[in-house]
Image (spheres, rainbow, N blue to C red):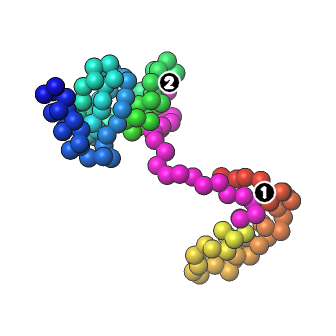
Amino acid sequence: MCVQIQLKHYIRNLPAATFRHHRFQSSCFQRTREVYNVKYDYHILQKELAVEKTITVTQAVRRFSELLNNIKYRGNRYTILKAGKPVAAVGPVEEVRSERTLGELPNLLRALPPLGEEAEEFAKDLEEILTHQPAMPEEQLWV
């Protein structure tokens, strides 16, 4: 009972943004950033650190599910190496990407800031590009 009260008090005083849940063993990860985790197996609150790590392609393939869970719940970032050279980086999505349609493209181009000396040439190039674009349905999504 005393332990539960202390645990509840400890949880209540944690910064909300750093509280994460996970089900993984922490022994195979390097630590770089503080995160508070609840381990489901032991029901123990632990102060742990988020990870920024390099792994090989083989490790990424064999532990893909664990990799994604660590990204989702811990905010980890990974650099994937092939033959010792970085080929990809994976991590949490930083911002929500909104979908846009092709019908919005002309308005987006008009909303660009002024360029300066080369603005007239650039504007002519854009007009030429827009006139030579193939016809596409305006509802089609593009990212």
In percent of the image, x 30 and y 30: which residue is there? 38
The residue type indicated by label 1 comes to Glu
What is the x, y in percent for residue 15?
26, 46
Q: Name which of mark 2 and mark 1 comes first in the sequence.
A: 2
**Residue 45 — which label?**
none
Residue 24 is left or right of residue 33, and the answer is: right
Q: Nearer the viewer, residue 18 or 11?
A: 11
Q: Nearer the viewer, residue 127 or 48?
A: 48
Which residue is denoted by mark 1 in the rendering?
A: 139
Q: CA distance from mark 2 to mark 1?
A: 35 Å
**From the image, which quarter does the N terminus lie in?**
top left
Figure check: 52 above or below 106:
above
Q: Which residues are magenta?
A: 82-104
Q: Is residue 93 magenta?
A: yes
In percent of the image, x 24 and y 30: which residue is there? 45
Which residue is denoted by mark 2 in the rendering?
A: 64
* Circle 1 SS class: loop
What is the x, y in percent for residue 28?
32, 21
